[in-house]
Amino acid sequence: MVAGGVVAVGVVAGAVLTGNKAATEVADPAGEPLSCEPMADQDPREQLQAARQEVELTLEQLHMVQEELEHYFLAHQEAEALLQRYRQQQQRAESLIEALLARLEASGG
């Protein structure tokens, strides 16, 4: 669900940057069309309402992306901790193997 919202924002932003009028209309998650066209023909109250809706949608998308980022950050931290434990176990195993080899060589075997 996050990716769809991010794609919609990217399409709208890309259309604004390139001036592509055909790609400037995208539907928000509620199905309402979003447009990057100037709102000069709208009443200022309608413009304010549209701007508020856009800000609300953008904030919702930001929160969703933030939650996803937090999820991946925590997963990365868990993976790093697990990797550190495995490295410690590997070092311990190598030390034990070296100690066993040293004992075998000392005993003449």
Image (spheres, rainbow, N blue to C red):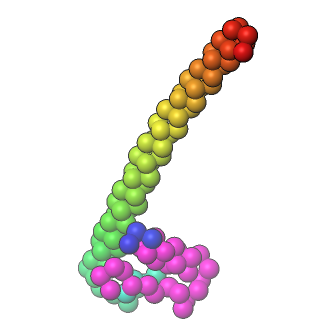
Does residue 78 appear to the left or right of 46 in the view shown? right
Q: At x 30% / y 68%, what residue is drawn?
A: 56
x and y, in percent, of residue 98 in the image: 66, 19
Report the number of discs.
0
Please tell me in which quadrant of the rendered image residue 60 appears. bottom left
Q: Residue furthest top?
A: 106
x and y, in percent, of residue 86 in the image: 53, 35
Q: At x 72% / y 15%, what residue is drawn?
A: 109
Magenta stretch, overall SS: helix
Does residue 61 appear to the left or right of 99 in the view shown? left
Which contiguous range is marked in magenta? 4-32
Whether residue 44 is visible, yes or no, is no
x and y, in percent, of residue 32 in the image: 32, 86
Depicted 10 relative to depicted 30: above or below: above
- In-front residue for pair 54/97: 97
Confirm whether the magenta stretch covers residue 22: yes
Q: At x 41% / y 46%, what residue is drawn?
A: 74
Whether residue 46 is visible, yes or no, is yes
Please tell me in which quadrant of the rendered image residue 21 appears. bottom right
Q: Residue furthest front?
A: 109
x and y, in percent, of residue 26 in the image: 44, 84
Depicted 12 relative to depicted 55: above or below: below
Q: At x 40% / y 58%, what residue is drawn?
A: 68
- In-front residue for pair 76/23: 76
Depicted 13 relative to depicted 64: above or below: below
Does residue 85 appear to the left or right of 34 in the view shown? right
Question: Looking at the rendering, in which quadrant would you find the N terminus?
Answer: bottom left
